[in-house]
Image (cartoon, rainbow, N blue to C red):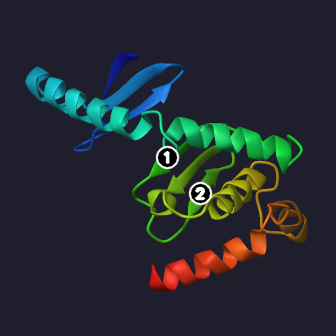
Amino acid sequence: MHEIVVIRSARRTRTVQARIVDGKVEVRIPARMTKGEEEKAVEEIVAKLKKRTTSSAHSDAALVERAHRLNETVLEGRARVGSVRWVGNQTSRWGSCTVATADIRISDRLRHVPDYVLDAVLVHELTHTFIPDHSAEFWSWADKTPLAERARGYLEAYQRWG
């Protein structure tokens, strides 16, 4: 398992967050937590992170691998790949990209969609790392994904009926 680094934050009031940064698990907790509360919170959040990132076709690690492969095969290596991970808090969008850091978040509602649909969403977000808007140039790159138009149709139907 990774080294665990606990970061106390005076600005954080209730939530606990964990992520892997440079091979270490960073756990952010409210500064006011007692040592006992900290131990319990760290144990719970690390268990959640481990479950989320275990090796499988639906792990964060597999998502990062997929993003690198799509960057090379579809986007000619133009995208920057920061962190890429599944998130459970995106209910109104399929994915998001923080342009400054090239961090990509993919809604876990897409865990069980066909591969071509997930690929289209990943390529869309990867394209934002080098074209931040939705210009014609952006779409010329994003639409290079095999079956991009079919994926858009799938997502429209999935949003309505899924």
In the picture, measured across the screen, residue 156 lies left or right of residue 126, that is left
Which residue does the image show at 76% across and 57% down from the upper left?
A: 132
Task: Name the secondary structure under disc 1.
Answer: loop
Q: Nearer the viewer, residue 50 or 139?
A: 50
Q: Nearer the viewer, residue 14 or 106?
A: 106
Q: In this picture, is 51 found above or below 39?
A: below
In the picture, measured across the screen, residue 114 lies left or right of residue 126, that is left
Q: Where does the C terminus fall, quadrant-wise?
A: bottom left
Distance from the alpha carbon under mark 1 to that under mark 2: 18 Å
Task: Name the secondary structure under disc 2.
Answer: strand
Q: Where does the N terminus fall, quadrant-wise?
A: top left
Q: Quadrant of residue 119?
A: bottom right
Which residue does the image show at 40% across and 25% down from the upper left?
A: 26
The residue that mark 2 highlights is: 96
* Mark number displayed over residue 144: none
* Residue 33 visible to an observer of this rendering: no
Q: Residues within 10 Å of mark 2 (few under 14, many from 20)?
A: many
* Residue 20 visible to an observer of this rendering: yes
Which residue does the image show at 27% across and 32% down from the upper left?
A: 47
The residue that mark 1 highlights is: 58
Which badge, 1 or 2, comes first in the chain's sequence? 1
**Disc 1 marks which amino acid?**
His
Q: Position of residue 159 (x, y in %)?
A: 51, 79
